[in-house]
Amino acid sequence: MKHLKRMLAICLAAGLGCSMVTGCTDSGKNNADKEKATVDIFQFKVEVNDALKTATQTYMKEHKNVTINLETVGGGDDYGAALRTKMSSSDQPEIFNVGGPQDIVDWKKNLEDLSDQEWIGKVAEGLLDDVSDNGKVYGLPMSVEGYGFLYNKDIFEAAGIDGESLKTYQEIDQAFGKLQEMIEDGKLKDEFPVLEAVMEYPVKETWVTGMHTANVSLGQEFSSATEAFESESIDFKYGDQLKDLIDLQVKYTSSAKTPSNLNAVDYSMQVGGGYAIERVAVIQQGNWVYPEIKNVDEEVAQHTGMIPIPLKGVSEGNIPVGVPIYWSVNSGSSDTDKQAAKDFLNWLYQSEEGKKIVVDDLGFIPPFTNYGDLAPSDPLSKIVAQHVKDGTIAPWVWTGAPTGWAQESLGVNIQSYVAGEKSWDEVVRESKADWEKARK
């Protein structure tokens, strides 16, 4: 029942025709007698950097007493490491990102209690669980996101493959195999001259492998990030199926015969330099990449579908859905700057102008229940919203893992496995040990 209520809550957040509470206030209205404030934002969503920059400029035009500086670190860079460096300096940001229960512990001394903010009662049920502690809330959910195998509908149609019908591991494997054979035989060369492989898999990006790919397995072992956070050990109950999922992606890349090459493939090569130019037909990513694909080729972006990412024989036909990251306010900032930071977040997510920016410009599926009919228009967000409505979703749990474990332990071990330097048994054994060591 709790799981059902959580799905319904996210459904409400996605603006799927449910009855909504309307109306809000703009607590950040500019008054001439307000003190001047500076809000430095340090965030990691590279896909929305430009749109977020425009939003801050819009806000500053209406609030002359506030200066907002935006710095984005993400994509191929380690945001967690960059944040630790930033927070150890004298130039700490007023607004930064946290991922969930482990970050709440790690950054507790820097987190402002946001429990009194006006948006609290409008967040979809269950979406604050991972950033709450002892009745206090320390983060505002940025958005609702989902991921799977994004695929080029035009390429699939040319190959005679119905992407929308693919659900199970076996169906996907067979379809990808058929497409790969047609590519190698040159049957699609005239229509798609640069197409070289079914997939691109950025093993260099340990967040793609150690967080997103691995979550397909871990999300069946743990029901939530909080449960993972509270666990002193990990069993890798579905470790064999995770290996199959990794192997599936590797074997349909152009590096299948030399998989160690994938350790040099990054996010940019996968998305902008791979999928968006039709060098590959499929990538493991989520609705957040739509703006980047669109910036390269709008037609490719519009003709993109999403195949559910399968855990063979365990969870098939589902896509992982959750809150990717939260906005937090630095408790160490001055009272004036903290209030300005809170006012900006309230304006962005609760003013009528801000809501439109969140949905239309940032392309977010809003994690709030008072957005009425506002919902992203891009095809990937629509697919995610439909999965939420249908209940064909799986949880995100990697934010409950020990600090750095997903990328620095599991992700690095997966790199060694793909390169042929470690067996899968070694990956599992070492990753288990690292989890238990971190929990002691």
Image (cartoon, helix red, strand yellow):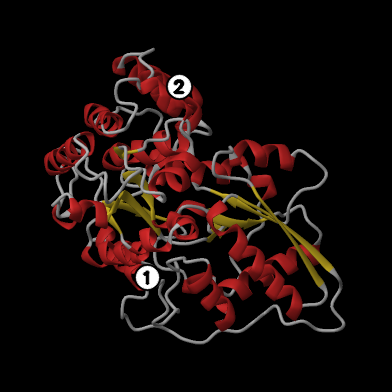
Query: Circle 2: is it few (<14), some (14-19), or many (20+) Cα within 10 Å?
Result: some
Residue 440 shows in the view: no
At x 45%, y 69%, the residue is: 366
Location of residue 321 in the rendering, given as x and y in whole percent from the top left corner: 34, 54
At x 70%, y 54%, the residue is: 330
Query: In the image, what residue type sits under mark 1?
Result: Ala
Query: In the image, what residue type sits under mark 2?
Result: Asp
Location of residue 416 in the rendering, given as x and y in whole percent from the top left corner: 41, 18
Q: Which mark is residue 233?
A: none
- Relative to residue 105, is residue 323 depicted above or below? below
Residue 44 shows in the view: yes
The image quarter containing residue 376 is bottom left
The image quarter containing residue 126 is bottom left
The front one of 124 and 271 is: 271
- Relative to residue 65, is residue 394 depicted above or below? above
Q: Which mark is residue 14?
A: 1
Q: Please state if 262 lies on the left or on the right of 11 as rendered.
A: right
Secondary structure of the residue carrying numbered label 1:
loop
Location of residue 212 in the rendering, given as x and y in whole percent from the top left corner: 38, 41
At x 55%, y 74%, the residue is: 357
Q: Which residue is mark 2?
A: 434
The front one of 252 and 76 is: 252
- Relative to residue 325, is residue 243 depicted above or below? above
Q: Please state if 200 lies on the left or on the right of 308 as rendered.
A: right
**Sequence-first disc among 2 and 1:** 1
The front one of 78 and 177 is: 177
Q: Please state if 23 lies on the left or on the right of 316 as rendered.
A: right
Location of residue 411 in the rendering, given as x and y in whole percent from the top left corner: 44, 29
